[in-house]
Amino acid sequence: MAVDKYTFKDADDSSDFKERQIKLVKTVSQSEFFSVRQLELAITVCEAKIAREEAKKLDLQAKIDAATTKLG
C-alpha cells in the first residue's frame, strides 16, 4: 500500500501554519498496457492531426500574405 509523506518544505520561522510550504511526496505505482498495433494506430492518428494542422497553417499564411499584399 502506498503511503504519502507530508513534511514542511524548509525550516520556516513563520508561526502561521497556513503560510508554511508543505512538501508532499507521493508513492505511486503505475502500470500501462498496450499493444504494438495500438501504438501504430496512435501514430497514424497523430500524423493525420499534424497534416490537418499543417494545412491550416498554410491557409492562415496565405491569408496573411494576401492581406499584406492588398493592404500593405
Image (cartoon, rainbow, N blue to C red):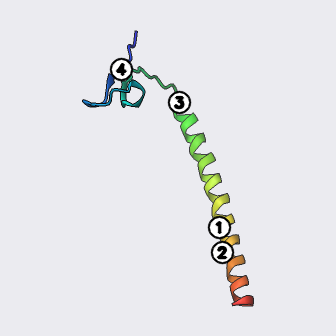
Under circle 2, the secondary element is helix
Give me the disc on residue 35. Answer: 3
Residue 63 sits above or below residue 38 on the image: below
Q: Which amino acid does label 3 sit on?
A: Ser
Mark 4 or mark 1, earlier in chain: 4
Which residue occupies 32% across, 22% down? Answer: 7
How far apart are the two marked residues, 3 and 4, measured between alpha carbons?
A: 37 Å
Judging by the rendered image, the residue that carries numbered circle 4 is 6
Under circle 4, the secondary element is strand
What x and y, as percent, mark residue 54?
63, 64
- How dense is the environment of label 1, judged by Cα within 10 Å: few (below 14), some, or many (20 and up)? few
Judging by the rendered image, the residue that carries numbered circle 2 is 61
How far apart are the two marked residues, 2 and 1, measured between alpha carbons?
A: 6 Å
Residue 17 sits above or below residue 53 on the image: above
Q: Which amino acid does label 4 sit on?
A: Tyr
Front-most of residues 42 and 5: 5
State yes or no: discs 2 and 1 in contact (Cβ < 8 Å): yes
Judging by the rendered image, the residue that carries numbered circle 1 is 57
- How dense is the environment of label 2, judged by Cα within 10 Å: few (below 14), some, or many (20 and up)? few
What x and y, as percent, mark residue 22?
37, 27
How far apart are the two marked residues, 4 and 1, measured between alpha carbons?
A: 47 Å
On-image quarter of the N terminus: top left
